[in-house]
Image (cartoon, grey):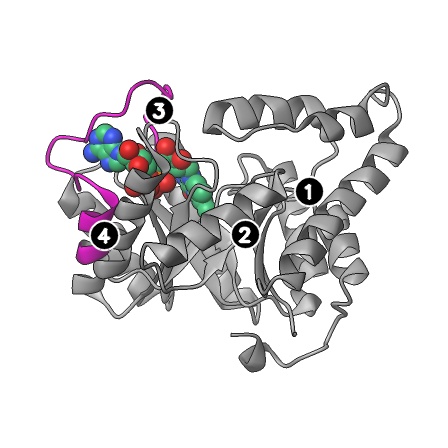
Amino acid sequence: MALNVSFEFFPPKTDEAEQTLWKAIRRLEPLNPSFVSVTYGAGGSTRERTHATVKRIVEETRLKPAAHLTCVGATKDEVDAVIRDYWDAGVRHIVALRGDMPDMGAYAPTPGGYGSTPELIEGIRAIGAFEVSVSCYPEKHPDTPTLDADIDLLKRKIDAGATRAITQFAFDTDAHIRFLERARRLGVKVPVVPGIMPTTNFKGIQRMAARCGASVPMWLRERFEGLDDDLETRKLIAATVAAEQVERLQAIGFDNFHFYTLNQADLTYAICRILGIKPGDKPLEAAA
Ligand code: FAD
């Protein structure tokens, strides 16, 4: 079965970071991803930078960009203005999210803002015929009482117009499989796209995983153990771990994968090559 990939980037803060980002975009572009997405900082803190990055992707590449957008830190009018700007810039895909508070504290809806992701999706769809992707959580979102409550919310996001769910990264591949089975049983029909996190920074992974409720399996700890000063081996392990995960998920029918690139192309590029994805394999239109 043919594999489709998409790549996620974050907007750069400095000129140097901008160069790193664009080097990554240029290296991954020939792999013809279905789309590339650009994140939106917690509390809307990167609004201008996200917009500028997405606009530059539209203007200077053949890639289809998706702009992440959250409900946090802006009124409905302000969020609507951002959505209209995207439409005017030729952007047709938004990743719609609740988002987190700027200090990552307990979530509270912004006064006068969109109160939830389904509401935001309705707002987006009222402005233009955007494709809308949303998040989902194989190991459950930390704010959710049960996985079924999370899946119920996912269904409401789909009813509001979302057509794709991208998962939070989960190193426990069985969690992805169980989640998909449960979501399908509870009536989720849209594609569920596993989010793949290729990274050599094991300490960073542990911090991120703790924040978003993802587990870090013992076998993964053991693979990275004692390699703090050995970047080369960590790179090989990271590429192998991610490729093994994709191959296992592909074997049971997943055929779309979203890579959290962290603006570093090399690992994602190597993983795609292991998976048999080569530059120019298919025209961009066919990758959609
Ligand atoms: P939802 O799926 O809408 O909700 C998650 C849980 O929060 C719900 O199950 C519910 O229990 C609870 N909840 C929902 N609404 C409320 C409410 N009004 N009051 C209290 N609790 C509520 N973050 C960013 O800041 N920028 C990004 O660009 C970004 N991109 C992401 C991309 C993906 C693919 C994923 C998986 C996550 C991303 N995140 C991003 C992280 C995300 O914003 C956080 O996980 C956030 O805590 C939840 O947002 P959501 O859209 O996933 O929430």
How dense is the environment of label 2, judged by Cα within 10 Å: few (below 14), some, or many (20 and up)? many
- Residue 119 vs residue 275, the one in the foreground: 275
Q: What amino acid is labelled 4 in the image?
A: Arg
- Gap between marks 4 and 2 measured at Cα: 20 Å
Q: Which mark is residue 198?
A: 1
Which comes before the other along the chain, label 2 or label 3?
A: 3
Of marks 2 and 3, the one in the foreground: 2
The residue tagged 4 is 156
In the rendered image, residue 228, in percent from the top left (x then y), is placed at: 82, 20
Q: Quadrant of residue 15?
A: top right
Q: Is residue 119 rendered magenta in the image?
A: yes
How dense is the environment of label 3, judged by Cα within 10 Å: few (below 14), some, or many (20 and up)? some
Task: Check the image and name the residue furthest to the front.
Answer: 185
- Residue 159 vs residue 202, the one in the foreground: 159
Tell me where the magenta segment starts and ends, as one range.
98-122
Left or right of residue 96, residue 288 in this image: right
- Determine contact: label 2, label 1, CB under 8 Å: no
In the rendered image, residue 230, in percent from the top left (x then y), is placed at: 89, 26
The residue tagged 3 is 102
Residue at point 49%, 67% (across, down): 64
The residue tagged 2 is 194
Left or right of residue 271, residue 191 in this image: left
Relative to 30, say whether 43 is above or below. Answer: above
Which comes before the other along the chain, label 1 or label 3?
A: 3
Name the element at disc 2.
loop
Name the element at disc 1.
loop
Left or right of residue 142, residue 152 in this image: left
- Determine contact: label 3, label 4, CB under 8 Å: no
